[in-house]
Amino acid sequence: MAQETISTDVVIIGAGPCGLFAVFELGLLDMKCHLIDILDKPGGQCAELYPEKPIYDIPALPVVSGQELTERLMEQAAPFGPQYHYNEMVEEVQKLEDGRFRVKTDGGLVFEAKVVVIAAGGGSFQPKKPPIPGIEAYEGKSVFYAVKRMETFRNKKVLISGGGDSALDWTINLQPIAQSMQLIHRRDGFRAAPDSVNKMHALVEEGKMKFHLGQITALHGDNGQLTGVTAKGNDGKDYEIECDTLLPFFGLTMKLGPIANWGLNLHENLIPVDTEKFQTSEPGIFAIGDINTYPGKLKLILSGFHEAALMAQAAFKYANPDAKVTFQYTTSSTSLQKKLGVA
Amino acid sequence: MRIILVDGKGREHELEAMEGWRVMEIIRDYGFPIVAECGGACACGTCQVEVDPEWSAKLHEPREDELDQLDQNYGGEWSRLSCQLIMSAELDGLRLRLSDIAIREAA
């Protein structure tokens, strides 16, 4: 991983709708943005939790899906050349002596920015952990919540738990390289692409893998190395499954995560801001969208857009204390239209 | 109309219920530890309860989105989302247990 520091005007933490629209508003003021998101795609909750659910309260769009809203915001932000960094979680935000900020991610990226915008929604998406006693001792050694490198699982006796797309996809993809493959799920129905479910059933028919009905209740092994699990079947009876690797796939949940360690004032896991600048307790760090709180706050995408517009003005002034801002409209200003690439 | 709720320590509580209310709302009103983060939209799975097997058959079958949440939140055979159970006369006396999952989420 390159250790070179990326210098920019703005680091936006979170590439959901508010982060994406902030690129537009900051871009009109000539501020260049880098967006960092823990997910592998833009859109935040819109993309991860409800990509296909219709949204009815975006002005001028009577109905739009989370997916489409994300695509349109990306298109609107594109003229300003935002840089996206996916699969990265911001771990540290540190103020430098010159008033700028150093931002570090878990993947080793380092940024220096004039301002930081936290548009992190409910926080960072993290895998849901199954409530099996003592599972922490195995995590990272023989229990994994994601597949980073398939090679890790070559010649392993893999047990996958879950019934969604991730569980099914990895069952099918890892089966050819694993020594053995087993899948356990609480019911004989799946919320996954029917094609994947059919493929899994075919592998079971061919004797290439096993499918178990039930729920894991205990892990067995030593020093973090799994040797097997106990599962409870739907008949209430316990049975044993031999495996040396467990991959639980139960979807994602949102946790505030490292934001709690950045020295900002927090209120019930939200970041209090003023409603003029949407600035946090640390000048130069702004918070917009679901992550912030103020009297009368509504967690609406619409409100986040408004917050982005006002924040952008304040962020520009923080970064350029001596510059004069002339407020302009995109309908009439040729200079704004040039920035948008339409004049 | 009432619900019998068994808490995490095995103690029984009798809750006054009202027709048409979501069981989740009744449990939450009494201050028991459930988050019900999504407010009853069947989108978070944090209001999970275990229904007494004898009562289970009297409930409507879970819809696909409820099953999906139970899948993702480690539901057992008798698990339901309390936000999807609506009180009616037939459910007077409904016996439930707070699930360990809900308790963990609320901790």
Image (cartoon, coloured by chain):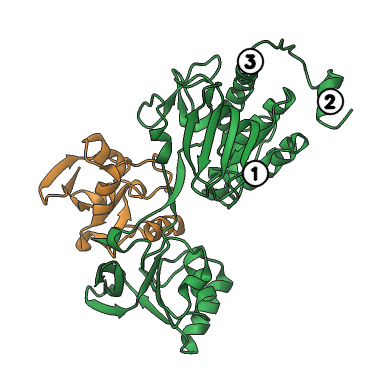
Residue pictured at 25% horizontal, 34% vertical = B29
Q: Are marks 2 and 3 on the same chain?
A: yes
Would residue B10 appear left or right of A102 to someone viewing this image?
left
B94 relative to A18, above or below: below
In front of the other: B97 or B8:
B8
Amino acid type assigned to the residue bearing label 1 in the image: Tyr
Chain letter, colour green in render: A
Q: Earlier in the sequence, mark 1 or mark 2?
A: 1
Q: Are marks 3 and 1 on the same chain?
A: yes
Judging from the image, mark 3 belongs to the subunit labelled: A
Q: Earlier in the sequence, mark 3 or mark 1?
A: 1
- Mark number, residue A95: none
Chain letter, colour orange in render: B
Alpha-carbon span between mark 2 and mark 3? 22 Å
- Mark number, residue A317: 3
- Quarter of the picture containing the C terminus of chain B is top left
Residue pictured at 61% horizontal, 23% vertical = A306
How would you rate the neighbour count of disc 3 (Cα within 10 Å): few for under 14, some for 14-19, many for 20 or more? some
Q: Which residue is mark 1?
A: A84
